[in-house]
Amino acid sequence: MKILPNRSFKTRDEFIQYFTRGSANLIDKNDLIVSLCKDKKVLDLGCIDHSFQIAINLGDNWLHKRIKVVARQVIGIDNLEEDVLQLNKKGYNIINTNVENFDLGQKFEVIIAGDIIEHLSNIGMFLNSVKKHMDTNSILVITTPNPFNLEQTLSAILNNHINVNDQHTVWLSPHNFWELCERHQLSILDLFWIDTRFHFVVNWKGIKLIIINKLINIIMSKRNILKRDFAVIMKIQEDTK
């Protein structure tokens, strides 16, 4: 699979309209990112995926490992010091540092921020650091959960509960995603709805609602705004370099 970003949204309204009414096709998150990294010099941020053990257990499904196979060169960054040491012993090139404030002194063709932006304390500092490693031909790929996901809404209604990782600090809607990009002189090239390994089912009082969950999947296939996760591809605005 070869995917190239090709929309280049010009206005906030155009981006939001595509977010809600554009292509309903789901793309596997890892397949999308691997396609964009093929034969490129890549920087993979927050690459370990929570822990050394999770990365190892994922095997060939660990995204950073898949990137390493197809990229011309890849460097990873993660703040898990011991996990970085263990993975580097296995032949990886991962730097132990904070993605909110780093400078490697080099540029990359593709920078990946897979499911990391929602963990950060300082998103603006993060984007400023990332931009130091981009030129006008570089792309930045950010994946993150959709705050309007239908499963979350029904979980709130039925169970008064939202399913969220305790380490998340923020949800990003299309409105504030666009604003972030504008403030940091980034242009949005494309948006993809993605499928990840992070699925959950709606239940009530501990009972799995089989019919409700089937209906949820049908509705999500028809309504973009209710899907689980999305990927945004960006570049530096041309008039800022």
Image (spheres, rainbow, N blue to C red):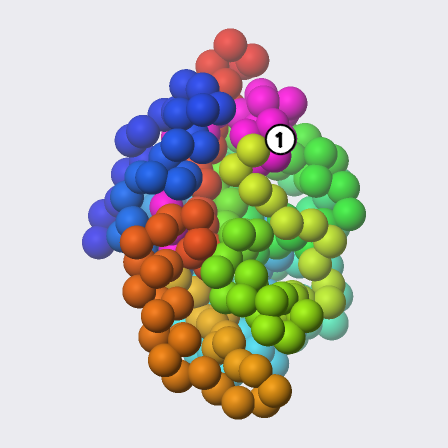
Q: In the rendered image of this protein, does residue 102 appear above or below residue 49?
A: above
Q: In the rendered image of this protein, does residue 91 appear above or below residue 179?
A: below
Quick one: label 1, few (<14), some, or many (20+) residues within 10 Å? some
Q: In the rendered image of this protein, does residue 116 appear above or below residue 63?
A: above
Q: Which residue is mark 1?
A: 180
User: 59 or 72, which is in the foreground?
Assistant: 59
Residue 197 seen by the camera: yes
User: 3 or 24, which is in the foreground?
Assistant: 24
Residue 164 drawn at (x, y percent): 65, 66
- Position of the N terminus, as image quadrant, is bottom left
Q: Residue at x 54, y 14 (%)?
A: 241
Residue type, label 1: Leu
Q: Which residues are magenta?
A: 176-194
Residue 89 drawn at (x, y percent): 60, 73
User: 238 or 218, which is in the foreground?
Assistant: 218
Q: Residue at x 36, y 80 (%)?
A: 211
Q: In the rendered image of this protein, does residue 177 appear above or below residue 81?
A: above
Q: Residue at x 48, y 86 (%)?
A: 208
Q: Residue at x 45, y 19 (%)?
A: 11
Based on the picture, tell me whether residue 185 belongs to the magenta stretch: yes
